[in-house]
Image (cartoon, coloured by chain):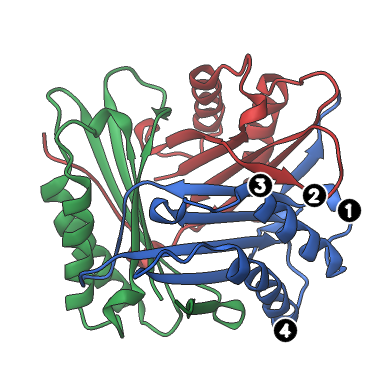
Chain colours: A red, B green, C blue
Amino acid sequence: MPHLTIEYSRNLEAGFALAETLREVNATLVASGQIRNEPDLKSRIVPLDETVVGTGLGDRGFVYCLLRLLPGRSDAVKAEMSERIAVVMRKRIPQPAGMMVQLSVEVIEMHAPSYVKEVLAA
Amino acid sequence: MPHLTIEYSRNLEAGFALAETLREVNATLVASGQIRNEPDLKSRIVPLDETVVGTGLGDRGFVYCLLRLLPGRSDAVKAEMSERIAVVMRKRIPQPAGMMVQLSVEVIEMHAPSYVKEVLAA
Amino acid sequence: MPHLTIEYSRNLEAGFALAETLREVNATLVASGQIRNEPDLKSRIVPLDETVVGTGLGDRGFVYCLLRLLPGRSDAVKAEMSERIAVVMRKRIPQPAGMMVQLSVEVIEMHAPSYVKEVLAA
């Protein structure tokens, strides 16, 4: 069931191995034991063409990761999931010279009573 | 007021009639009687260029639909809205041979006290 | 910490000064005094290629602004943040002749216990 969305400002794209990053994040999330079946985890990484960070001058970039889970985990488990994502991202996000790069990660709950989830019949 | 976002992995794009799908989803949501004025419903469908599903091998695709409503509906009504979306999507999502395709639909509430909504003066 | 996402339907792109709009929104949000350090505010504006508004005929466009804040502000403060965004957007959004253009703005809270936020070491 979980959905992961990673957004990154386009000024970070040089040398950012997108598919490898997603595979590595998926692997550590599945290894947490919190995801029942591995295909339940659906991840995407999305470039942002037009971004502005704050009001100051200078090159600035950012990456924002949002994991959506069904309810039922404690805050401690959610924080552990965030940290698993952050560990991969710290290693994978390019650091262009002179650029301030910010990382943020958040875990939120989905709305279980309305949630439809199915594998379409082939 | 409602906002609908449909995301789909790019490997599903062949034969996916995007505008027709949105029109059909909008029609069934308006037919539910839950949307006061039909132009309140604002829908978009967005391709995802870079996706990874789980950790296994094989072709995998997915579609994720998120409907945002103002508060005031029961969970049963929200589940009915999800199911209306799902009915259209099951019919419209392409099924490439050999690909595992997942559909998910979720309905969440917007934050009413901060919500600004207006038609701009022409 | 705050994240701002502005989505706009592609039929509004002619004459829409994207970077200037983001800079002006960031400036008014920082001026609110609600953002501790100006680089905490990370904003993006994103075009939507495929949109459908309601079920009626005629040209229709929309802009949707979502501000994510950490918890701790009253609804009144959130509404003030929405209004600050709306003031800029009313001025900046193009109004093509004959098109119904809708603006919506929403402020939601992030999940603090799972939130990771850091400046990556250069």
Could you classify mark 4 by the number of other residues whose Cα lies within 10 Å: few (under 14), some (14-19), or many (20 or more)? few
Does residue B72 lie above or below B15 as drawn?
Answer: below
- Disc 1 is placed on an element classified as loop
The label nearer to you, 3 versus 2, is: 3
The answer to whether the residue labelled 4 contacts the one labelled 3, judged by CB atoms less than 8 Å apart, is no
Of residues A31 and A5, the one nearer the viewer is A5
Amino acid marked by disc 4: Ala
Q: Sequence order check: which comes first, mark 4 or mark 3?
A: 3
Instruction: Report the residue marked by disc 3.
Output: C19
Which chain is indicated by disc 2?
A: A
Instruction: Report the residue marked by disc 1.
Output: C37
Left or right position of A40 against C90? left
* Cα separation between marks 4 and 2: 23 Å
Give the image location of residue A21, x and y in percent.
56, 22
Q: Sequence order check: which comes first, mark 1 or mark 3?
A: 3
* Cα separation between marks 1 and 3: 20 Å
Left or right position of C118 against C107? right
The label nearer to you, 1 versus 3, is: 3
The answer to whether the residue labelled 1 contacts the one labelled 4, judged by CB atoms less than 8 Å apart, is no
Q: Which mark is residue A54?
A: 2
Q: Do the residues indicated by labels 2 and 1 lie within the same chain of the protein?
A: no
The answer to whether the residue labelled 1 contacts the one labelled 3, judged by CB atoms less than 8 Å apart, is no
Which chain is indicated by disc 4?
A: C
Could you classify mark 1 by the number of other residues whose Cα lies within 10 Å: few (under 14), some (14-19), or many (20 or more)? few
The label nearer to you, 4 versus 2, is: 2
* Cα separation between marks 1 and 4: 21 Å
Q: Quadrant of residue B30?
A: bottom left
- Residue at left offset 38%, top offset 54%: C11
Which chain is indicated by disc 1?
A: C
- Disc 2 is placed on an element classified as loop
